[in-house]
Amino acid sequence: MTDTQAPNPVRVDQTEPATPKAATHIKMSARDVNVFYGATHAIKDVSIDVDMENVTAFIGPSGCGKSTFLRTLNRMNDTIPIAKVTGDITLDGEDIYSPQMDVVQLRARVGMVFQKPNPFPKSIYENVAYGPRIHGLAPNKGAMDQIVEQSLKRAGLWDEVKDRLHDSGTALSGGQQQRLCIARAIAVDPEVILMDEPCSALDPIATAKIEELIHALRGKYAIVIVTHNMQQAARVSQKTAFFHLGNLVEYGETSDIFTNPREERTKDYITGRYG
Ligand SMILES: Nc1ncnc2c1ncn2[C@@H]1O[C@H](COP(=O)(O)OP(=O)(O)OP(=O)(O)O)[C@@H](O)[C@H]1O
Ligand SMILES: [Mg+2]
């Protein structure tokens, strides 16, 4: 698939789950997902498909549930005691909330990159090697060196750090730290990468690097990015989901959402009328 291909006419909303193009590989599916924090109903009956071929952007005003919903996709909400999730979420058809699901394994398959870069207080090398070691992905030092190099290359950071792999990860610039966190996620060979406002703490140059990286990684991993930056959503994604007050209001081709939204609430948001 290329950027120049005609837009997919298929649109999705909550009552009418996606009918994908034949060639689209649906990686994750959510059906009728609700999230409660005690009495707060943060996500309301959300159904959505995330595919391998497109980068999916989640947009919407602050507090509308973007991070909450993103966290349901790799069970990060499990770490919040008052959070309760209902509904179905599958990864390649497998129920990720089933009691048989190994959550540590799941979070390797569905990696996450946060708003604030959070490298471990360890060397650059160790930041990347940590996950593969835990998961037993490298039989020896040579194999580990290769995983570290390849992950840093894929994250667009290798040339900047190859001569100082044993310096601390926390000594890197913010943009470099964020790419290190992406390398760390990539190192365990994930299938999906979730990014929650990955550029909001970065300057425009570091932001541009992350956006280039997202382009380069598209198709290798299913990618979901939460962003408040409309231009960024338009630049990096091919699908956009607009959330408002816990509802998924509209989901479709990014070009349609930005030029021809179906819902008044979407239009109001993207034209800056509220948010
Ligand atoms: N750990 C938590 N405990 C209780 N309530 C929470 C928690 N996290 C989020 N909420 C509530 O859930 C709702 C959705 O919050 P969420 O952080 O998902 O929004 P968001 O769209 O990511 O916002 P932002 O754009 O500001 O990051 C809000 O009402 C918020 O107060
Ligand atoms: Mg958030």
Image (cartoon, grey):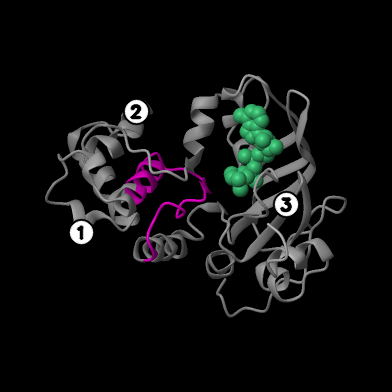
In this rendering, is residue 45 above or below 209?
Answer: above
Question: Which image quadrant for residue 83?
Answer: top right
Q: Mark 2 points at which residue?
A: 136
Mark number, residue 159: 1
Q: Which residue is drawn at 31% across and 33% down?
A: 120
In this rendering, is residue 243 above or below 88?
Answer: below
Q: Badge 1 local density, few (<14 within 10 Å), some, or many (20+)?
A: few
Q: Name the spot of residue 13 as percent of width and height, x first.
A: 82, 55
Spatial CA distance of label 1 from label 2 is 27 Å
Residue 46 in sight from this viewpoint: yes
Q: Which residue is drawn at 67% across and 53% down?
A: 61
The answer to whether the beta carbon of the residue marked 3 is less than 8 Å from any atom of ligand 1 is yes
Q: Name the spot of residue 16 as percent of width and height, x first.
A: 86, 54
For residue 225, side relative to residue 45 (left or right): left
| Label 1 element class | helix
| Label 2 element class | loop
| Label 3 element class | strand
Quadrant, the C terminus: bottom right
The magenta segment is: 178-204
The kind of residue tagged 2 is Gly
Q: Badge 2 local density, few (<14 within 10 Å), some, or many (20+)?
A: few
* Of callouts 3 and 2, the N-terminal one: 2
Spatial CA distance of label 3 from label 2 is 38 Å
